[in-house]
Image (cartoon, helix red, strand yellow):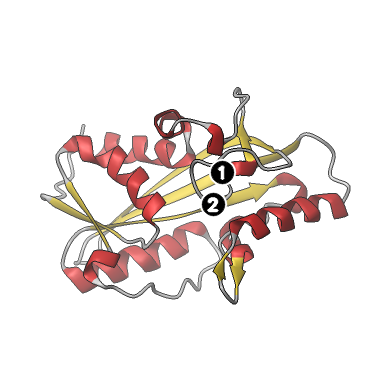
Amino acid sequence: MVVDLGPRLLVATHNSGKLEEIADLIGPHGIEVVSAAAFGLPEPEETEDSFVGNARIKAHAAARATGLPALADDSGICVDALNGAPGVYTADWAETPAGRDFGLAMARTWDACESVAAPLPRLAQFRCTLVLAWPDGRDLVFEGKVAGQLVWPMRGAQGHGYDPMFQPDGYAQTFAEMDRAVKGEISHRADAFRKLVARCFT
């Protein structure tokens, strides 16, 4: 059964890089993508300890506030040698008094691997959970992932977040070295979106 999203979909993010990725993925289906920032919505506090829990908080808050269907993403990098950390706390590892610094977060992650003498290759997965919520409280959940390894030093200037230190399986480039369209085909977010598209548009 095709899910009716209507002509506009609110993306519950203030992250411009994430918004661009989502617009690239959903735009071809004829739906206008608008951001939470465009509505002046505050970022709700993410109090859950799982990707799906935090995505639900963001999606339902945005849907209730605007009366539009809302899509929220919670994603992060999970490092095998660190028992899945930083995981749901990926963005928290980048927090500084002056704002988020992912260069610092990546250095912290590599240092943590060094401190436990993690063997090479240092395996990791990017994980993404999408929650599509409606103002009446309904929602659908879609999960995606991509496996790879950490590299050091960081490489590349594309992308955002941990992209410069993540090299996906089967590729010699990091996400931050890839053309955006190539990353858009293989990323954790693309994996989750393929499931969303299969459920909502086909």
- Classify mark 2: residues with Cα within 10 Å, few (<14), some (14-19) or many (20+): many
Q: Residue at x 59, y 77 (%)?
A: 97
- Front-most of 141 and 156? 156
| Type of amino acid under label 1 | Asp
Q: Residue at x 80, y 50 (%)?
A: 113
User: Spatial distance from mark 2 to mark 1, Cα to Cα?
Assistant: 6 Å
- Residue 137 visible from this viewpoint: no
User: Badge 1 is on which residue?
Assistant: 163
The answer to the question of whether label 2 and label 1 lie on touching residues, with beta carbons closer than 8 A, is: yes
Up the image or down, 179 lies above or below 134; here it is: above
Q: Position of residue 154 (x, y in %)?
A: 67, 43
User: Badge 2 is on which residue?
Assistant: 161
| Type of amino acid under label 2 | Gly
Q: Residue 95, located in which quarter of the rendered image?
A: bottom right
Judge left or right: residue 65 versus residue 53.
Answer: left
- Front-most of 36 and 147? 36
- Residue 44 visible from this viewpoint: yes
